[in-house]
Image: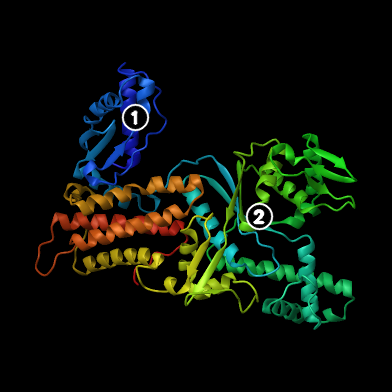
Amino acid sequence: MTPAELSQAVQDAVRAAVEAGEMTVAVPETVTVERPKNRDHGDYATNVALQLAKAAGKPPRQVAELVAARLRELPGIAKIDIAGPGFMNVTLDAATQGELARTIVTEGAHYGHGDAFAGLKINLEFVSANPTGPIHIGGVRWAAVGDSLARILRAAGADVTSEYYINDAGVQISKFGMSLQAAANGRPVPEDGYVGEYINGIAAEIVEANPGILDLAEDEQLLKFRTEGLRLMVAEIQRSMAEFGAHFDVWFSEKSLHDSGAVEKAVDRLREQGHVFDKDGAVWLRTTDFGDDKDRVLIKADGDTTYFASDAAYYLNKRDRGNDVTVYMLGADHHGYVNRLKAIAACAGDDPSRNIEVLIGQFVKMLKDGEEVRMSKRAGNIITIDDVVDWIGVDAARYSLARVPTDSTLTLDIDVLTSQSNENPVFYVQYAHARMSSVARNAADLGIDKGAAEDFKPELLATEWENQLLGRLGEFPGVLATAGELREPHRVARYLEELARDYHRFYDNCRILPRGDEEVTDLTRARLWLAEATRTVIANGLGLLGVTAPERM
């Protein structure tokens, strides 16, 4: 019995008591059941009686007894104790608890998936760094978190479009082109331009592919460097994202909004909504009506559109594509965008509390030998995605970047993340999977098979370590649903570490395979089922984080 199944059973018991006229309350839509910290209090506990007591007009313990009486009739419930003011502590029999191992192995890669977000169409935009240089470490964090979140939301039933917004219009792209042109001509980079080995490399590549480019007029030359440099930089970003395992369904061009007239159309649509006004020769959006600290300019007095106008057009484009929820993942220096993006949604007639979400990711720094690493050989003044991968590898990078809440500053210690020790969290989890894979190989070498599903005897998994491990396995679907709902992939990583710990304890205290001439028993086979179930869940969880589950380490 999983926590979800027990929750449903408690809900049904409340409904039965209401229908029998024993109490008058609204049956709760969901019932929370949790593993108690003190295992002497049973396998699961619920405070539903405390929640219903006031509405029922009865003491909580009396409400608990009405519900418990029905639960005790269910197969698999060993006992129910009512503790304190009205907590219900539920103990399952060993067979019911152990049955979960068969369920997990049978469902395989699908175990943990659900339909909590079925029918919901989500646009998830992340990274979206300017295509004027390599992805820096802040963008790497969003690549790990965003791609993991997309996987988790899909596992929860959502229709997710992962998207990268290419800022290929505006001043920064012009400066990028001028920097390439200067490098190719041996001139100093213009003020506020871009520097680093990558600029020299791209400039040289453009010159080699376009003989005679340096003989063109300055304006023609600049246009060529800007166009070709942008193309090469986007291709470089796409390569690095692919190698990092971050998948994007859509690469959306800001320039396309201008070329298609979408920006002007967006201004007209917002004017029709009654939130656009003219002042001092410029066109403004009255975002202060919806919590912004000041109104925003859409079209300047000289007729040029602003970045904010592009943001408005982009939001409307996302909604026009049928997305119910648009999620923006922005860096720590973009706090000011939260209210203005929500104001755009409100001005467009949407519900900013439902149709748009803005997540802010804090800074990341890296340590080596106890000292902060600040410089990249290639980019000059930033740490790039290729630097991170070279130093610690894709698995360690993805896992460690996703395992900490994004609203917390994160420090990655290169020495720890390249060590094969329990201090390295990704190694700790991957080693647990490799250890289980080794058990399966050793069993095969000994000619031992866990047997058919119908021969599995779950009631034999009765020790405290097996009980703890089974309880943890049962939490996985709920962890995924919560991680998706709260947009917090770190919950999956932390869960995997707890699961790995419980497995190591089980392995150290419960012998799985016989030694020497010892007989192969039903307990042997039952524990092989449990080990396989645990291996399945760890592989599923690592896969949702975009991390490999090695069979050997």
Q: Which residue is mark 1?
A: 50
Number of marks in the rendered image: 2
Residue 305 appears left or right of 486: right
- Disc 2 versus disc 1: distance between alpha carbons? 43 Å
Q: Nearer the viewer, residue 319 or 301?
A: 301
Q: Position of residue 387 (x, y in %)?
A: 56, 74
Q: Quadrant of the N terminus?
A: top left
Q: Nearer the viewer, residue 42 or 152?
A: 42
Residue 374 appears left or right of 167: left
What residue lies at 23% left-to-right and 47% top-to-bottom?
98
Q: Is residue 263 above or below residue 427?
A: above
Residue 328 appears left or right of 446: right
Which amino acid is tagged 1?
A: Leu
Q: Position of residue 171 (x, y in %)?
A: 79, 62
What residue lies at 37% left-to-right and 23% top-to-bottom?
54
Instruction: Give the image's coloring scheme.
Output: rainbow
What residue lies at 34% left-to-right and 56% top-to-bottom?
498
Disc 2 is placed on an element classified as: helix
Which amino acid is tagged 2?
A: His
- Residue 107 bears which disc, if any? none
Q: Position of residue 384 (x, y in %)?
A: 60, 71
Disc 1 is placed on an element classified as: helix
- Residue 334 bears which disc, if any? 2
Query: In terms of image quadrants, where is residue 135?
Result: bottom right
Query: In terms of image quadrants, where is residue 285?
Result: top right
Q: Position of residue 357 (x, y in %)?
A: 60, 45
Q: Is residue 392 above or below residue 149?
A: below
Q: Would you call the spot at circle 2 few (<14 residues within 10 Å), some (14-19), or many (20 or more)?
A: few
Q: Would you call the spot at circle 1 few (<14 residues within 10 Å), some (14-19), or many (20 or more)?
A: some
